Image (spheres, rainbow, N blue to C red):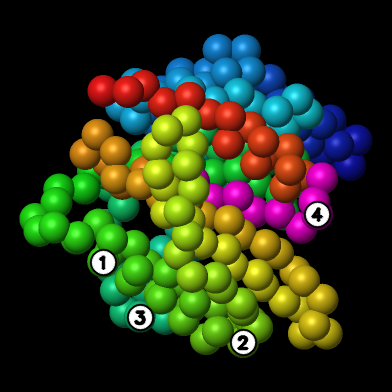
Amino acid sequence: MKIKLVVLLILTIVLSCKSDPNKQIDEGKITENTYHSDEIGWTMNIPNGWNVTHRSVLNRRSKKGLDIIKESTGLEYDDSELKQLLNFQKNRFNIFQSTSEPFEVEYDGEWEDNNTSVKALLYDLYTEKGIKTDTTATKIANIDGLSFHYFTVTLYKPNGDVLLNQSMYGRLINGFDFGVNINYNNEEDKNEMLEAWLNSKFDQY
């Protein structure tokens, strides 16, 4: 039985690696190492050596995140319109994530207000869990002529060492709240993801 179990585990790993990357995303298309989203008008190359994240992993992360929000705030967040775009990773600490969600603006500055609230919620969630957290104020990044709000989060281990860094980018584009999150714990992986992201191309509508 042990031998059969090992064989099954190996098959699971191999099949996961060979799974169609386009079945792991909700919108857009991956051709070789290039992703393109029609809705966002966004094109980005996937760095060599990085794997598109399997949908089962994305679903597990989403459920865990929603459970934490509900437990900490009592809020029931409806993620039915949230779309997983390009997501890839090298391991569980070094991850590139992107999502989109329809956002109908009802007043000037609503998206900016919502963005500020999300940052505050994120900080509160981390600190409530007893994780020492540093954040930066919102800055502006220019990517292929488009401005993005971005801010960074640094999480620390109990001994004071850095556990994880997060760089979060967001913009309201084509009626969607478009977000990119870069998680990393070393400079080499950070630079690979950041270079690919900063070299993104956006259709100019």
The residue depicted at 81 percent of the width and 31 percent of the height is 10
Q: Which callout, 1 or 2, points at the residue further toward the start of the chain? A: 1
Q: Secondary structure at mark 4?
A: loop
CB under 8 Å between callouts 3 and 1? no
| Front label number (1 vs 2) | 1
Image quadrant assignment for residue 111: bottom left
Q: Secondary structure at mark 3?
A: helix
| Residue assigned mark 2 | 130
Q: CA distance from mark 1 to mark 4?
A: 32 Å
Q: Amino acid at mark 2?
A: Gly
| Residue assigned mark 1 | 113
Q: Amino acid at mark 1?
A: Asp
Magenta segment, prevailing SS (helix, strand or loop): strand
| Residue segment shown in magenta | 179-188
Q: Secondary structure at mark 1?
A: helix
The residue depicted at 19 percent of the width and 60 percent of the height is 110
Across and down, in percent, residue 19 comes to 62, 22
Q: Which callout, 3 or 2, points at the residue further toward the start of the chain? A: 3
The quadrant of the rendering that contains the N terminus is top right
Label 4 packing within 10 angstroms: few (<14), some (14-19), many (20+)? some
Q: CA distance from mark 3 to mark 1?
A: 19 Å
Query: Is residue 53 in sight in this rendering?
Result: no
Query: Is residue 176 in sight in this rendering?
Result: yes
Total numbered labels placed on residues in the image: 4
The residue depicted at 13 percent of the width and 58 percent of the height is 108
Q: Which callout, 1 or 4, points at the residue further toward the start of the chain? A: 1
| Residue assigned mark 4 | 186
Q: CA distance from mark 3 to mark 2?
A: 16 Å
| Residue assigned mark 3 | 73
Q: Amino acid at mark 3?
A: Thr
Q: CA distance from mark 2 to mark 4?
A: 23 Å
